[in-house]
Image (cartoon, coloured by chain):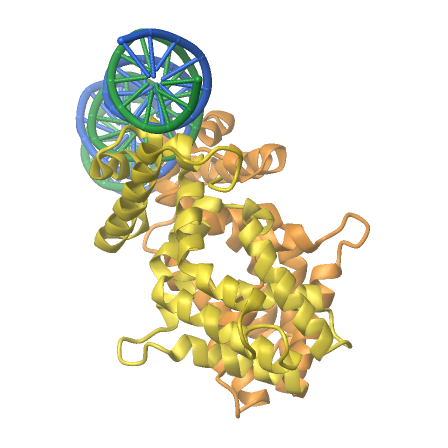
Chain colours: A yellow, B orange, C blue, D green
Amino acid sequence: MTAEGRAERVDAARNRAAVLRATELLLAEGGGDHVSIDRVAALAGVGKGTVFRRFGSRAGLLQALLEERSKELREAIAGGPPPLGPGAPARERLLAFLDGLGAIAEGNATLLAAHEQACAEDKYDDPSYRSWHRHLSGLLAEARPDLDADFLAHALLAVFDGGLIRHVTPPDEPRRFTCAVRELATALLDG
Amino acid sequence: MTAEGRAERVDAARNRAAVLRATELLLAEGGGDHVSIDRVAALAGVGKGTVFRRFGSRAGLLQALLEERSKELREAIAGGPPPLGPGAPARERLLAFLDGLGAIAEGNATLLAAHEQACAEDKYDDPSYRSWHRHLSGLLAEARPDLDADFLAHALLAVFDGGLIRHVTPPDEPRRFTCAVRELATALLDG
DNA sequence: AACGAAACGGACTGTCAGTCCGATTGGCTC
DNA sequence: GAGCCAATCGGACTGACAGTCCGTTTCGTT
């Protein structure tokens, strides 16, 4: 959007930021169900139409927020230093990626859950999901050419479910999820 | 409900069946979004209140339908012949269970997706989910005592997602999903 | 200063889950 | 088979929400 044709008008940019910030607030305050477009718009001090023009839908709004939170990881993968970026052996890169995604997921379980809920079915066509899947499936194919990399990538990503993360994360062990994912991946890679 | 105190009145039983049948029909006709309680009630020829008294909520209705579809598997696990029922080695039982669950999931991807959608978050507290999880996690603990069976069971169940199943199932290969799950489980067990 | 395009906002629509209570009916008793 | 009561029924009603629409305002350019 920003890099398309004309630049964004300053009022548009201001509103976009206000809406995202309001969404964060409501999400933290009352969980995914608490984030209705009416509330977001009211809290951001903009009209409802503005939210929709900017983000297309409730799902798009949550998607945008998620994108913002995972931008760093995406850049580190594309052009950062190994083992996250290119250059490391597939196995190391894969584990580093899962660690990175796990950290994001653990820190944003509520947002993740709300997004899954809003996306309903088309989650698998979403560009963001596809990009994670492409990366993961490529690395898997390299590390374990004997297995069905495409499906396994879906299977690994399926574990990054907001509800599941909350369910398996006790208050005293906030990294349980990422550790368990790492164990799962290791078991698969070493098989 | 049926086995609690008094027996079900005949009109109640008739209506329950009519509602479930109507739900199936709407599900097949137009997918999960098409199943609204209003429509179900109208098609079943009952009032809306009846649906709610019987099933509690939209999620409960879908849950009940799912339960009906998996009753056989549940019974086979609890008291049927090996390898599904008790007696077979953990590894065989586990694979047989995943095959059975896969068959149900492949045949009911739409229902599964609708149920996930409706359950939102409390999916993991649902008695049906818990029972699958308990079974799977017990078998895993036996077959691979070195791994985190509790988490792995969640991870395997996470793959049984209506949307994912539809996404990975090409028309010409309806068993792709179950085969892939079996490969995944084998890789885990053999690691 | 003036003008056109882009952005705004909030009233409006259609839909849905879930509630409530007066009307009905099944099943038991005598 | 008459009568009774609790269980069941049905559908109007409520509150909330996603998404649309269009008259109004604002930005940025000339």
The one nearer the camera, A13 or A84, is A13
Please state if A188 lies on the left or on the right of B146 as rendered: right
The one nearer the camera, B128 or A80, is A80
The one nearer the camera, A48 or B182, is A48
Please identify the residue farthest to the bottom as the structure is shown.
Answer: B146
Q: Is residue B49 visible?
A: no
Residue appearing at x 41%, y 66% in the figure = A104
Residue B13 in the image, given as x and y percentages of width and height: 45, 40
Please identify the residue farthest to the right as the structure is shown.
Answer: B172
Q: How many marks?
A: 0
Residue appearing at x 37%, y 78% in the figure = A175
Please state if A9 lies on the left or on the right of A42 as rendered: right
Residue appearing at x 62%, y 50% in the figure = B108
The one nearer the camera, A92 or A157, is A92
Q: Is residue B21 visible?
A: yes
Residue B2 in the image, given as x and y percentages of width and height: 41, 52
Q: Quadrant of the C terminus of chain A?
A: bottom right
Residue D22 in the image, given as x and y percentages of width and height: 38, 9
Residue B164 in the image, given as x and y percentages of width and height: 61, 55
> Considering only vertical position in the picture, is A47 above or below A97?
above
Please state if A28 lies on the left or on the right of C13 as rendered: left
Residue appearing at x 71%, y 53% in the figure = B169
Residue C7 lies in quadrant: top left
